[in-house]
Image (spheres, grey):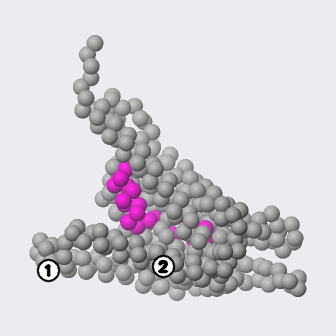
Amino acid sequence: EREFGDKHVSPCLGFLILLGGRASQDNNNNGNGAMHWFPWGFFVGLCILATVPTTLSSGVTLVAIGKGNAALALMIVVVTNALGVVVTPLWIQAYAAASLLIRTSTTSTSTTTTTSISNLDSTSLLINLVLTVLVPLVAGKVVREILHCVGGDGSFFDMQTHKRWLVHVSSLSLIIIVWMNVSVGEAQLKAQNGKSISTLVALGILFHLTLLALNAPVVLVTMRKQHTTASRRWWLPSKEGKAALLLTSQKTLPVSLTVLSLLPSAAFGSEEQRGLAAVACVVPHVCQLFMDGAIASYWAGVDADEEQAEATPAEEF
């Protein structure tokens, strides 16, 4: 049920985002646009972010910091990302079929141009996602098991020994992907003012708060922590609830950038708008990491207080 919310509730927000973008474009073309300073690429980026599955390593790390169930978090990551390879192209095809991935613009000669992808080939997008997401995931798992088996006890290549190096390689690869996507729209990005960037940050925060607000009641009802008399924090989720709440409210950056790179240029109107769409994926991702980092730290502190209270014998009067 929680995976259903991650794969179907948040993409519905993508419809609202694109509807807002289309309304803004129509108003701009009529000369009375209220958000002419918010580019179309930002709308597409936020929409794509709404369709992708949960975060990868960062989500599991935050769950571990918050003293949640890291094993369950890893299972949610694997299952949702495997499903996302199939579900994400279908949602994007639904946006295209609803004529929402259409960009209209008015030139200096007062002529209006329209670009659309109403006949998006979701099969091609699915195949590309399988090759770029699932195949590397499976290949990495196979290589890891082979290296472990060759050494018998894992001495041939101990993952824990080289964990820091592997994390750095993963982070560097993500930075390169972000840089490649954002650099396409460098000129357009420099042309943006503080108003558009601050609005993007606000929308990223609002998007994550919306997902948390939708998922929190379900988690607290089904996975509420069973407290002792030493604690009356009824609103604190269990270890499994922490994993479910954080991961069903987060969105992965690498997959969203991969989807952006696979979409035809007609969805953006220009390659520069594709770069802005990448920025619209990066900014909310950073916002959710800061927000969930604070939540995880708070959970860890509360659990530490509870453990200390349970370990301290009650005073007798």
Residues at marks 1 and 2, CA–CA distance in whole angstroms? 32 Å
Report crowding for label 1: few under 14, some 14 to 19, many 20 or more residues within 10 A (C-alpha).
Answer: few
Residue 275 in the image: x percent, y percent?
61, 78
Choose top left, top right, bottom left or bottom right for residue 272. Answer: bottom right
Q: Total label count?
A: 2
Residue shown at 33% from the left, 36% from the top: 306
Disc 1 versus disc 2: nearer the observer: 2
Is disc 1 placed on a helix, strand or loop? helix
Assess whether residue 247 is covered by the magenta stretch.
no
Instruction: Judge whether residue 166 can be spotted in this image.
Output: yes
Q: Main secondary structure of the magenta part?
A: helix
Mark 1 is on which residue type? Val
Residue shown at 58% from the left, 54% from the top: 210
The answer to which of 218 and 138 lies nearer the viewer is 138
Q: Earlier in the sequence, mark 1 or mark 2?
A: 1
Report crowding for label 2: few under 14, some 14 to 19, many 20 or more residues within 10 A (C-alpha).
Answer: some
* Quarter the C terminus occupies: top left
Q: Is residue 105 above or below residue 243?
A: below
Q: Which residue is mark 2?
A: 177
Mark 2 is on which residue type? Ile
Choose top left, top right, bottom left or bottom right for residue 122. Answer: bottom right
248 on left or right of 28: left
Magenta region: which residues?
45-66
Residue found at the very far top of the displayed protein? 317
Q: Which residue is mark 1?
A: 150
